[in-house]
């Protein structure tokens, strides 16, 4: 079995973006449902990488064809301090249509704006939802190359990320989980659901944006994990 090493992701910034484009894009159910191309998501994934690379953890092994490290898994994370001023909770409206958010999103690619709008709908008021804690550690992306699945890599990446969040003195961890496998991984680690957005309710011109997801998923979840006051056993 190949040796898997877990290291800080910052030195692998370029490789992380390539992994997002070539691995995560074709494994993540919601991007697959959009038939998203690399051009569709390049800017969106670049911003995602830039926001999370400083606190990322990656799994690497030696490539068979060279002495260079090969990324086989990534966990992108970022720390969100408490915002200034009051942040009101957003009440979920199952009849909301997201055409305006897609039309006016920050990206020129429509599929990128769809992904951005969905994540924003779930986590836009996370500080208010979690009780205005001081520091929230966000797990933005956790993904393992399918060729290396079922080796416990995702669990180890998450375990190390939880420890990193503790080291940074964060109060809570949050994540938006859209894949069934990811939701199971986070539940197993002790995460709980604080908001659910059914894919059937995320609509553009009254038509659901994410349809026929390959893993049979029905909803995206905003999930959280409490750090301060927990026992160390909760991390295992």
Image (cartoon, rainbow, N blue to C red):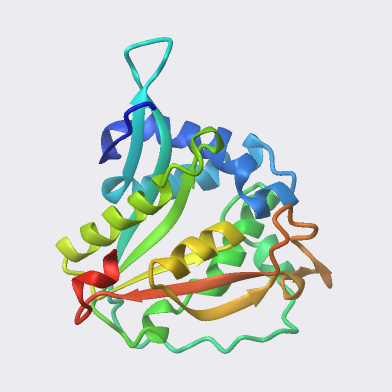
Q: Quadrant of residue 94?
A: bottom right
Residue 41 in the image, given as x and y percentages of width and height: 60, 43
Towards the viewer: 168 or 153: 153
Residue 157 placement, left or right of 91: left
Towards the viewer: 172 or 43: 172
What quarter of the picture does the C terminus occupy?
Answer: bottom left
Q: Quadrant of residue 207?
A: bottom right
Above/below status of 20 relative to 236: above
Residue 235 placement, left or right of 212: left
Q: Furthest-front residue in view? A: 1
What quarter of the picture does the N terminus occupy?
Answer: top left
Towards the viewer: 148 or 58: 148
Residue appearing at x 20%, y 76% in the figure: 231
Residue 193 in the image, given as x and y percentages of width and height: 49, 78
Residue appearing at x 50%, y 66% in the figure: 176
Residue appearing at x 53%, y 86% in the figure: 90
Above/below status of 153 relative to 209: above
Residue 224 in the image, given as x and y percentages of width and height: 40, 74
Q: Furthest-top residue in view? A: 65
Number of callouts in the render? 0
Residue appearing at x 55%, y 72% in the figure: 221
Above/below status of 94 relative to 5: below
Residue 145 placement, left or right of 96: left
Residue 169 placement, left or right of 23: left
Q: Quadrant of residue 202?
A: bottom right
Residue 56 in the image, given as x and y percentages of width and height: 31, 47
């Amino acid at each position: 079995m190949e040796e898997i090493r877990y290291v800080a992701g910052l030195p692998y910034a370029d490789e992380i973006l390539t992994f997002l484009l070539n691995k995560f894009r074709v494994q993540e159910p919601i991007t697959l449902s959009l038939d998203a191309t690399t051009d569709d998501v390049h800017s969106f994934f670049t911003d995602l990488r830039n926001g999370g690379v400083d606190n990322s953890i990656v799994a690497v092994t030696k490539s068979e064809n060279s002495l260079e490290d090969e990324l086989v898994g990534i966990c992108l994370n970022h720390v969100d301090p408490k915002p200034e001023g009051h942040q009101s909770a957003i009440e979920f409206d199952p009849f909301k249509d997201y055409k305006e958010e897609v039309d006016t999103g920050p990206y020129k690619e429509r599929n990128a704006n769809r992904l951005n709008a969905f994540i924003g709908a779930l986590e836009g008021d996370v500080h208010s939802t979690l009780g205005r804690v001081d520091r929230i550690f966000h797990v933005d992306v956790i993904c393992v190359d399918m060729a290396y699945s079922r080796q416990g890599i995702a669990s180890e990446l998450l375990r190390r990320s939880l420890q990193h969040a503790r080291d940074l003195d964060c109060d809570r961890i949050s994540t938006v989980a859209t894949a069934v496998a990811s939701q199971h991984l986070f539940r197993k680690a002790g995460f709980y659901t604080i908001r659910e957005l059914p894919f059937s309710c995320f609509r553009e011109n009254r038509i659901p944006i994410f349809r026929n997801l390959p893993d049979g998923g029905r909803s995206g979840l905003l999930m959280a994990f409490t750090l301060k006051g927990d026992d160390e056993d909760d991390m295992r």
